[in-house]
Image: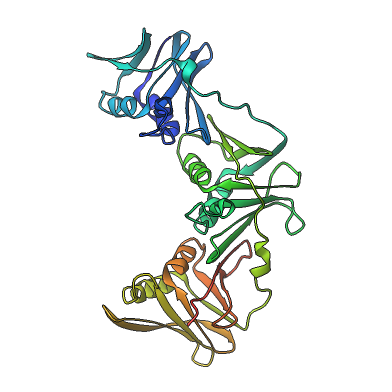
Amino acid sequence: MKFTCTKENIIESLGLVSGIAGRQSSLPILTNVYIEAKESGVEMIATNLEIALKTYLRAKVESTGSFTVPAKVLGDYLQLLPDEQITIALDGTELSVICGSSSTKIKGMPSDDFPVIPEIDEQHAYTIAASDVKDALQKTVIAASKNEIRPELAGICCQFFSERYKGLVLAATDSYRLAEKTLSVSQGVDEFSCIIPSRTAYEIIRVLGGSHSDETNVRLWLSDGQIALRYGQVEMTSRLVEGTYPDYTQIIPSEFATTAIVPTDDFIKRIKAASLFTSDGVNAVSFDMNAEQKNIGISSTSTQSGEHSSEIDGEIMGQENSILLNHRYVLDGLQHIAGSSVRFLVNSSEQPCMFRPADTEDYLYIVMPIRQ
């Protein structure tokens, strides 16, 4: 195996896949990146047995072959090289890296020891705008559970062409809050439901957020147990979460007693100010909606740090209402709501409230109240 490429290209390709290569894995081969030189170019693959990432590196291939080396060692070394052509060759059980006057050999492991990456099962195929997928995942993964006690809640529910919506619905909940985002699908009409692991969602966000591709669409394939994605020169496969996602739609209120529309940025700042005066572990901030005075009172108190109160003017419709919420949950949602204004919808201090963009219906974020 021998090929020549630019420093920029190999660092970009390695960076795309090496994020999932474990650094302290019980299987040493999983800390390695698989490199295969073919007549058509060079493939680089990394996996943690749950997720696999493959990318294609533009290079001049002199001879074919494959090998694996520690992803971190190779990446750290490449960063230190000058911006010149790099020649990489297999030399026995070592990978030779030559750049200008620098030469090094990195010990690795045979490619035969690397896990076999499953082929893409193209059972259900969809094409979606890449920016929409990234945005929807960012807005929903925040509500996924952080522990694995209930594995299905630690993932994102994906529903293609369900009775509720003829497109894609993404949703996540940790039982304390719920986020749901709808988006259109360019190609594909199959009805299908699955649960994507949160780790996979974050990897998809990372891949779609890079500047490595001019593609505007992402291609998805789904089957029982597997999701696959292709975006530009990157391919990803991942296991899906087993089980059935709970019917979260039961907790979405159909109507509200009070609706407020307030400036998003000012609302966030006032909640952050109140958060400085809350008790650790409770994070309670009170919201008092006054329809007559057209404002929301935001207050908090702490035996350690003191107390705070402020008011934000807005359009308040319906009855007066009050609710106590965890400021961290509220801020997580507000920071993902697009637009200059946000709708804040409340029924009572005992029922879940909702946050939505002021002018669209494609995103909702529900927070359960703190019961006094």
Figure check: 137 above or below 60: below
Residue depicted at x 65% and y 49%: 243
Residue that extends furthest to the left in the rendered view of this protein: 101
Task: Indicate the position of residue 151 as horizontal and vertical percent values.
Answer: 56, 51
Answer whether residue 180 is visible to the viewer in this image.
yes
Depth order, front residue of 358/137: 137
Task: Indicate the position of residue 328 as horizontal and vertical percent values.
Answer: 42, 67
**Residue 6, picture quadrant:** top left
Figure check: 165 above or below 239: below
Q: How many marks?
A: 0
Task: Indicate the position of residue 248 as horizontal and vertical percent values.
Answer: 65, 63
Depth order, front residue of 44/239: 239
Q: How is the image coloured?
A: rainbow
As drawn, is 365 to the left or to the right of 221?
Answer: left
Depth order, front residue of 192/363: 192
Residue depicted at x 63% and y 37%: 226
Answer whether residue 36 is visible to the viewer in this image.
no
Figure check: 171 above or below 46: below
Depth order, front residue of 14/248: 248
As drawn, is 123 to the left or to the right of 335?
Answer: right
Task: Indicate the position of residue 113 as horizontal and vertical percent values.
Answer: 47, 18
Quadrant where the N terminus sits is: top left
